[in-house]
Amino acid sequence: MKKVILRLFLGLLGAALLLFALGMIEYIKAISNNGTLVSGGEKRAYLLYVPKSYNPATPTPLVISIHGYVEWPAHQAQISRWNRLADEQGFIMVYPSGTGFPLRWRTFGTSEADTNPRADIQFISDLIDRLEGEYNIDPARIYANGLSNGGGMSFVLSCALSERIAAVGMVAGAYMYPWESCQPARAVPAVLFHGTADPVVPYSGGPSRMFDLPFPNIPAWAAELARRNGCADVPQEIAPGGAVSGLRWTDCAADVIFYTIDGGGHSWPGGEALPEFIAGPTSPDIDATRVMWEFFSAHPLDGR
């Protein structure tokens, strides 16, 4: 009897270890990047997704989606669900990886190496070059978007790579890059999403419970972006529905739309929810990914 119990125990233990090993393999696969390049002497990584419908004979849009602080490329793909839309609409997705531990993007615009975005800007430019060399990328339809620190990096790209990035999308953006450092060659269309209950980057600005940083007042920041994009002073109100309201600036050199998610947290609206005790609620009332793509589709790079 004891031998039977021992065999049963060892069998169950072996099965548990096998399941654990398989789970770890799937986890490693899930967080793994599938591409690297050397940029500025530094090895950088990215996660690429090419839909099965890709045709090398057809110029194809490229969407760059940038993860937030403490996150990683595969997680950005998971919460935003961009790959599903890429399959549906036929564009290529790439998720670049930040640097350091934890992973992050250098978006403060200071002279210090760990906060100056120059190296990250060069990496994204080099990544575009790499993908243009490997795929038939439409140079008029290259777009950038991101969450939190990644949203802030998307804004930096609109300042520094405005002749390559057709339009940007920013979700719960951590906008720390100073306005005086943003000198784009052209105004870049932008669509923004932010929740009023964001516990990480407060809607009303100032430090949060997690970061003692001088975050800007988000509605005021959006209005300043519209002003710099040459828009009319008074925006049009739009009502997507549910807990979402919006402002659309018109008569612009480059359009700006700002969606406010009432009660929304530091998460991707319409995407996979982050833990609510950390990020707050994830709104189902608007699909930020689809709305962003519709905005991108309407704003190719002029003259390309």
Image: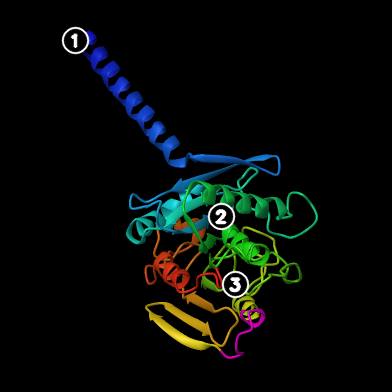
> For the magenta stretch, what is the residue range?
226-234
Mark 3 residue type: Val
Q: Which mark is residue 68?
A: 2
Q: Is residue 123 rendered to the left or right of residue 261? A: right
Q: Judge from the rendering whether residue 265 lies leftward or rightward of residue 6; answer left or right.
A: right
* Camera-nearest residue between 277 and 36: 36
Question: Tag 3's secondary structure?
Answer: loop
Can residue 72 be seen here? The reply is no
**Residue 210: % across, % down:** 62, 58
Q: Is residue 73 shown above or below 279?
A: above
Q: Which amino acid does label 2 sit on?
A: Gly
Residue 228 against residue 144 in the figure, above or below: below
**Number of other residues with Cα within 10 Å of mark 3, as a class: few under 14, some 14 to 19, many 20 or more:** many
Residue 227 in magenta stretch: yes
Estimate the spatial distance between the alpha carbons at disc 3 and disc 1, rounded to whole Å.
Answer: 75 Å
Q: Which of marks 2 and 3 is nearer the N terminus?
A: 2
- Residue named by callout 3: 188
At a point 33% along the width and 49% down the height, the residue shown is: 52
Residue 1 is tagged as 1
